[in-house]
Amino acid sequence: MINNHNNDILSSSSESKIKKKYKNNKKINQNLFSNDVDYIYNLPEEIFVKILSYLYEGDIFNCSLVSNYWYKVTQSDEVWLNIYKKISFHCQLLKQDYEFDFKSIMKSNDIAKSNWKNGKYKVKVFNNAHSEVPTSIKFTGKYIISSSNSAVKVWDYFKSEGIFTFKTKNPINVMELDIRNKKVIGGALNGFVNVFNLKTNEIEASFKGHQSFVSCLKSNHNSTIFCTGSKDKEIRLWTIDNNQYYTDDDQQENSSLRMIRLLGSHTKIITNVEWCNRNNNHLVSSGDKLIKLWDVETGQCITSLEGSSLNINPSCLSVKDGFIASGGEGNTVSIWDKRLDTPIKKIVTSDTIFYTLQYEPSLDSMVTGSFDFIRCFHVSSATLISTLNHKPALVSSAHYDPEKVISFGLDGIINVWNCNLDYSQSPNPAINNKCNYKIECQPLIRTTHVDETKIITGSYDNTIRIFDFTNDKKDESNKCTIM
């Protein structure tokens, strides 16, 4: 069969499949297999890509069989990027600066999805990666960035080797990526804020940003604004401007890092700062038992919300899709619609303190970590659905998506549960209370990174470990080259 493009020839086998599929529909059959104009071909390619963006992998494969032109468009990265956005729950790759082949990414994710269920992974170990304990880990898509008290190191993820070391006198506690300019922002225990340039391998800026240690650091959706919170109870906004410099009264040095605004303060240490994903100008902070919603353009506090906890702990503030959830010292988790001043839901638990909390409004579910238990809640009904046992150690952090829950314990053990926590479609999804498998990562884990294909940990033995679920061969002897 030949359409109006001279080089677009459909194979006889593919043609027979399509004819068989539509043989009972005379109208479609007449139009499809006539020599009439191919209206899709006459459309701008951008519109065709937009049409394909509503389809999934199987549909895209069927479309690729129609003609050479259809095949060409269905293989474009933009088509597979749209599929990734629909299928990926956290869309973490969109926050990284590496140029991805999203068709290959989707294939890797399919492999990883099966391996997550079956506990198949390969381990890479960076022995003695730092001379001190790693404090923070970031992943750019190609490079792993890790920090400690005396250095920030860059590792090539694919080659498993060290690339560069930034020596610093400022003990970096938290980091964030500037995906626009290939830079890393670091907040230090002595209150300094540093800028590390991954292109030039230089420390581009280093000056005193706070009077006490920087406890939290977050960038907005496109890395144009960075927010720091500190033990000095203040919240500051920063931007990186390559054409201007920041001048301080006590330090007359040129720097690309410029402070935009001092937002305000809490009565105690700032424990969390989170950006609102539905309004890029709104920021949520916690300190003491108050949650404050800020307008970063005006610098005004829009509203203050008082939670049920005496203090809101680090990693116990979740902000997503216009909802805010908080927990800490106390037995209650409060959930707000950020447009309202009073909680829309209070979930009372048997726990007296929370160490980690993650709320996903799209799944209508929430996971909390307290002592040696992970608890899963159905939010609409405010009911406990499942208790996952992490004994004998305390839970330090947790991660979950619609298919699995991962908990990290103070004993260096990682537990993985395969369970469906999507309550948006079914009020009674399947819950697996039994841990599917454990990953030993001795000793105590200090910092983690989790995405669709891997876990990266930094431990108190100064070692960085990568658990890669795209490779189904376990090999804990795989050592990586260090600097």
Image (tube, grey):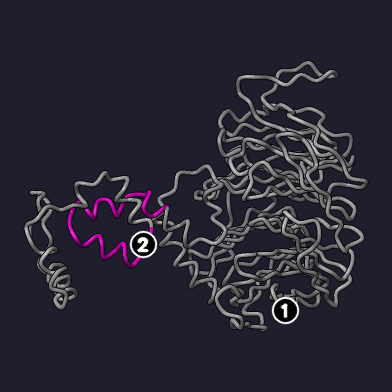
Quadrant (top left, top right, bottom left, bottom right) of the C terminus: top right
Q: Residue 43 carries which label?
A: none
Q: Are marks 1 and 2 in contact (CB under 8 Å)?
A: no
Q: Name the residue under label 1.
A: 388
Q: Which residue is at 48% across, 73% downward?
A: 114
Seen from the viewer's position, the closer of residues 302 and 401 is 302
Quadrant (top left, top right, bottom left, bottom right) of the N terminus: bottom left
Q: Which residue is at 76% across, 43% downward?
A: 294
- Identify whether 247 is placed above or below 348: above
Magenta residues (range): 54-81
Q: Name which of mark 1 and mark 2 comes first in the sequence.
A: 2
Q: Label 2's element?
A: loop
- Identify whether 145 is placed above or below 447: above
Residue 232, by quadrant, is top right
The amino acid type, in three-letter code, at marker 1 is: Leu
Q: Is 445 part of what is drawn in magenta? A: no
The amino acid type, in three-letter code, at marker 2 is: Leu
Whole-percent x, y for residue 277 in the image: 63, 50
> Distance between the Cα atoms at labels 1 and 2?
36 Å
Q: Mark 2 points at which residue?
A: 55
- Identify whether 187 is placed above or below 105: above
